[in-house]
Structure formats: C-alpha cells, structure tokens
Image: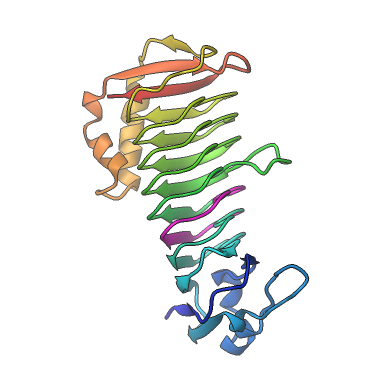
C-alpha cells in the first residue's frame, strides 16, 4: 500500500521537502509524519500543515496535487519509489542514490544535481542545469538515469561526470558544457555553445544539425561497434515507446557526423549528430 500525501493548501513561499523520502518515512507512523518539520526561512511549519497523510507508510510515496513552490522533493533518496502528481520546484531528485522518482509535470532548476544512482522520469519540461553541478562543486550528476519527455533549460549536464540523460524535446544553451563523462542524448534542437568546455563524455543529437564552436574539429564517424552496443543497451533498458528506443530500432540507418573537443581544454569529448 502506498503512503499518500495530498496537498491541503499551497505554501506561502518556497519550502523545502528535504528528508521527506520513502526510505525514511517507511519506519514512521502517519501521526509522526504529519508532525515532521519543514524548512521555511526561520520558521518550521509541520508537514501536516500542507499535506493530508493517508495510507500506510511503505516504500512507495505519492504526492497528490503538488505545488511548484515545494523544493528538494526526493532529495537524497536512497531506495523506494516517489511519485509526484503535478509540478515540483528546484532540486528534485538532487543527490539521489537509488530508487525511482516519477514526476507527472514539470520540475525546476538543478533537478538530479549530484545524482549518483536511481532514476528520474519527468513527463513535462525541466528547468535549467538539469544534472548539473552546483556552482561551488567540481562535478554534477555522477550516476543514474534521467528521462525528460519535454524540453530542458540551459546548461543541461554541466560538469556531468557519469550516468545518462535523455531529453525527448529541445535543450537550451550550453548543453553538456564542461562535461567530464557520461552520455547525454537530445532528440530535438540544442541551443548555442553545445559542448562548451567539454573534457570527455558523449553528446548524441538527433534533431537539427548543431552549430559547433570552432574549438571542435569534425572527424570521420567510424563508430560501428559503439553504435551496436548503444543500440542494444537502449533496446534492453528503455520503454518501447521511448523516442530513443525508436531511434535504436533503426540504428542501422543512422547517418552521422562526429566532432571532437573542446580543444580549448582536454579535447576528448565527442558530439555525434544523426539525421
């Protein structure tokens, strides 16, 4: 049985839901859950002031009628499943270690920042810096998988170190900027300066041909073994209806271009574009 948190009233401002995760709530009673303090400036309102708690504590947590002013949803979660009905604020699934987070709406900035494992699925758009590092940190996303059905904002994958990000829509400027490792795939268009400062890792593009910076050099796209492994991985791990699973189904027809860079740095990243 799921534990369901149904919104009673919208918060007066941005409030953090850090610590409200299924692996922690599974050991608590419903009454104790309602008394959990939330962070809002110098005040500490109770969770029950905003949400009605129903169901039995379990490893499946459901937020019903979520408001985008709630931030840090599923932040630091290590196991279980968290389902969010509606939009959510910044830092959704940040520092995620395991489990699955599903958002039936949009998410704000820095979703999946610091993520090390697990999976985040977003049915709407994502804000800027998806999977990116906080300004004072050396690395962003370090593992796991993110799937966004809509568009993403600027600096998606900035300083990404490991893991996979799939964007079914468009991506903003500086996509995969300063990327260290991992795989980022975009089915739509990308904005300006894609791959800026890229050190390693792979950016795969399936929309309109990108305008690459002059610090990237185009090379021959000889990647038969890599593409076969990629196709197998996507077909085995992605839902059949996913846009990238459909691309994998016709991988033998891909006609690609490949750039290496950013030569202003290490220059060992790669950007591949397929018609």
- Residue closest to the eye, 140 or 189: 189
Task: Quadrant for the N terminus, please.
Answer: bottom left
Name the residue located 78 percent from the left edge and 71 percent from the top edge: 42
Residue 264 rendering spot, x and y as whole percentages: 62, 14
- Give the left or right position of residue 17, taking residue 172 as reference: right
Quadrant of the snapshot with the C terminus = top left
Q: Is residue 218 visible?
A: yes
Q: Residue at the location (63% across, 41% down)?
A: 133
Q: Name the image quarter holding residue 258.
A: top left
Q: Is residue 108 magenta?
A: yes
Q: Is residue 250 magenta?
A: no
Q: Is residue 117 left or right of residue 220?
A: right
Q: Main secondary structure of the magenta part?
A: loop
Q: Quick one: 15 or 195, which is closer to the camera? A: 15
Q: Is residue 100 above or below residue 201?
A: below
Q: Residue furthest bottom?
A: 31
Which range of residues does the magenta coloring cover?
95-116
Query: How many numbered discs?
Result: 0
Residue 162, by quadrant, is top right
Query: What percent of the width, then of the height, locates residue 113?
Result: 59, 48
Seen at 62% across and 72% down, the residue is: 12
Q: Position of residue 171 (x, y in %)?
A: 44, 37
- In the rendered image, residue 185, in percent from the top left (x then y), is placed at 41, 35
């Amino acid at each position: 049985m799921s534990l369901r948190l149904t919104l009673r009233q919208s918060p007066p401002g941005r409030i953090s839901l850090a610590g409200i995760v299924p692996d922690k709530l599974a050991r608590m009673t419903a009454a104790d859950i309602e008394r959990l303090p939330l962070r809002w400036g110098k005040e500490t309102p109770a969770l029950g002031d905003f949400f009605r708690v129903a169901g039995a504590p379990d490893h499946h947590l459901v937020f019903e009628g979520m408001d985008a002013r709630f931030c840090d949803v599923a932040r630091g979660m290590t196991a279980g499943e968290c389902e969010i009905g509606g939009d959510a604020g910044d830092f959704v699934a940040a520092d995620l270690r395991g489990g699955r987070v599903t958002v039936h709406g949009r998410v704000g900035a820095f979703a999946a920042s610091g993520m090390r494992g697990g999976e985040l699925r977003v049915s709407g758009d994502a804000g800027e810096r998806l999977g990116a590092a906080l300004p004072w940190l050396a690395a962003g996303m370090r593992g796991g998988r993110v799937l966004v059905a809509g568009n993403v904002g600027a600096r998606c994958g900035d300083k990404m170190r490991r893991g996979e990000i799939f964007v079914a829509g468009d991506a903003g400027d500086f996509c995969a900027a300063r990327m260290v490792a991992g795989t980022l795939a975009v089915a739509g268009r990308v904005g300006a300066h894609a791959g800026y400062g890229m050190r390693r890792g792979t950016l795969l593009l399936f929309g309109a041909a990108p305008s690459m910076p002059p610090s990237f050099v185009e090379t021959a796209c000889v990647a038969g073994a890599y593409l076969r492994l990629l196709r197998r991985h996507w077909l085995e791990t992605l839902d059949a209806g996913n846009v990238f699973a459909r691309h994998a189904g016709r991988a033998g027809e891909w006609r690609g271009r490949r750039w290496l860079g950013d030569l202003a740095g290490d220059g060992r990243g790669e950007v591949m574009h397929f018609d």
